[in-house]
Amino acid sequence: MTTAVLVAVYSLSIASAILLISVALNTPRLTTARVSLALYLAATTVWSAIALVYVVRQPEDPSNNIAWTLPVVAVMVAAVRTLVTALSNAAWRPSPAYLVSISLHPLGMFAIAAVPGWHHLLVEVRPDGTAEYVGLFWVHAAVSYGLLVAALVGMTQVRKHIPPLARKNFPVMLASWSFPVLANVFTIGVDGAEGFDITPVAFTLTAIFLGRSMIQDGLADVIPVARVQVFESLTDGIFVLDTAGRLIDSNDRGLYFLRLAGLEGRVHGKRMVEISPDFAALIAADGERDVSLPSGDFVVQITRSPLGDRKGRTVGTLVHIRNVTVEALRTRELIRVRDELAEEARINELLRAELADQVVRDQGTGLHNRRFVFDTMPSLVERAQAEAVSLAVIMFDLDDFKMINDTYGHAAGDRALVAVARAMENVEGSAVVARFGGEEFIAVVTGMTRDESVLFADRIRAACAAVTVPAREGSIRITVSAGVAWSAPESIDATALIERADDALYEAKRAGRDRTRLASEATA
């Protein structure tokens, strides 16, 4: 292999490793696995650089080059060991004792490399200029291979702890470790101490496969979940999405929900909207959803939780989907029964209020009745006295009502009563108007002077006189007589007021009807 080709190969290896380092560290969540991968790549970069210098200079004595390669190799082996441990348990963090233990091998090799007089313990240069590996080099090689093989054996156990997306490409990643092993065996066994070392190039090639599984497939960002004990035993569906919305991980129950939705085939590594826009919309927000699937109708509860690292940066989303069909239907039935009971209670209350109103309501005219007047009068008197205002009672009677009944019939008389009641209600004012009995009506007003009370009575009489009641023989003309009794706030006697108003009414009748009379104080 020519020098130019070797320079190109080592340079490409260095450039590739540096690029992979930048990709591994370019993340908001700097996990132990990513840091270990970056350290591994940094070691291969330095190793390739040492090999590149050796190719360019081609010194007669290779011992110095080999001596400085060994601590770099030891650092790389330590990085691989840490990487495998981090992949098997994403929650693991190296302790100080662990860091000291993995530093012993690299520090020992560095000490030997730093003392030129010890290089002969690694490589022996014969008088004829040839070189061969000796004692301490083989100890280093045995230790390195022993640690590396142990790490690779541990990596085979990682598979059951990783998400399905990374699990698919895991065999290829594991097989890629054969490249540096074969390259190293060739370098040591064939080229010997004087040959060119292509092992770092092979390690960089392995790093490319390793980086694909760790970074692209999310192996370096596995959420620390005890999959066997917790994750897979959950009866609810769990989906782990990265910040781009890709499905990084899921438990068996989650895949079961996807199958219920008719989604089969490879789903991990794809964005949810690519897997199914409908399913992506279903899990896009928290809440209860009614879902119609080919296998039936379900009610599911969706809960989304942000996933963050120790620095508080968001690195993904945990989607929790639970089948709550039974609970939801039971709750909805309870709500339906509750609403029905509430509606029945409301109707009963309306009926009770209606019945209570009917007791104090005149059925013929719709006005309040005599009972209502006597029930309400105490409160009217109390309020008038509290507000220091007057109170007046006005009694009305339809003139010649018996003649209306005899002439036009009782049906016409009933219509006349209703028409008069409506006319009284339509007169402006705050009076309490009621049918007192037969053709008699009563109005109770507060806050009016004597004269205002009389004018109010006349307005009501005028409104009644304007009423037209149709009958077979033509329209019926109605006139009304009125009696007014007024009292100042300090001397209100409700019973006496009604009697005085009734006396004044009969005075109006005796005076010729269709008029208003004010009761005098002497009338009492």
Image (cartoon, helix red, strand yellow):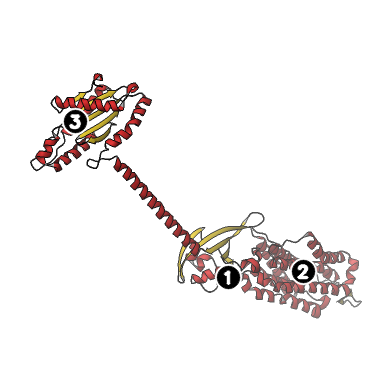
- The C terminus lies in which quarter of the figure? top left
Foreground residue, 409 or 239? Answer: 409
Q: From the top left corner, tell me how far across and down residue 464 is, in percent.
A: 18, 33
Instruction: Name the front one of labels 1 and 3.
Output: 3
Foreground residue, 489 or 163? Answer: 489
Mark 2 secondary-structure assignment: helix
Q: List the residue tagged with mark 1.
A: 252
Foreground residue, 500 or 233? Answer: 500
- Near mark 1 (Cα within 10 A), the count class, few <14, some 14-19 or many ≥20, is some
Instruction: Name the front one of labels 2 and 1.
Output: 1
Foreground residue, 45 or 298? Answer: 298
Mark 3 secondary-structure assignment: helix
Q: CA distance from mark 3 to mark 2?
A: 114 Å
Q: From the top left corner, tell me how far across and down residue 219 is, in percent.
A: 65, 67
Compared to residue 514, the image places residue 322 above or below, namely: below
Q: What amino acid is at disc 2? A: Val
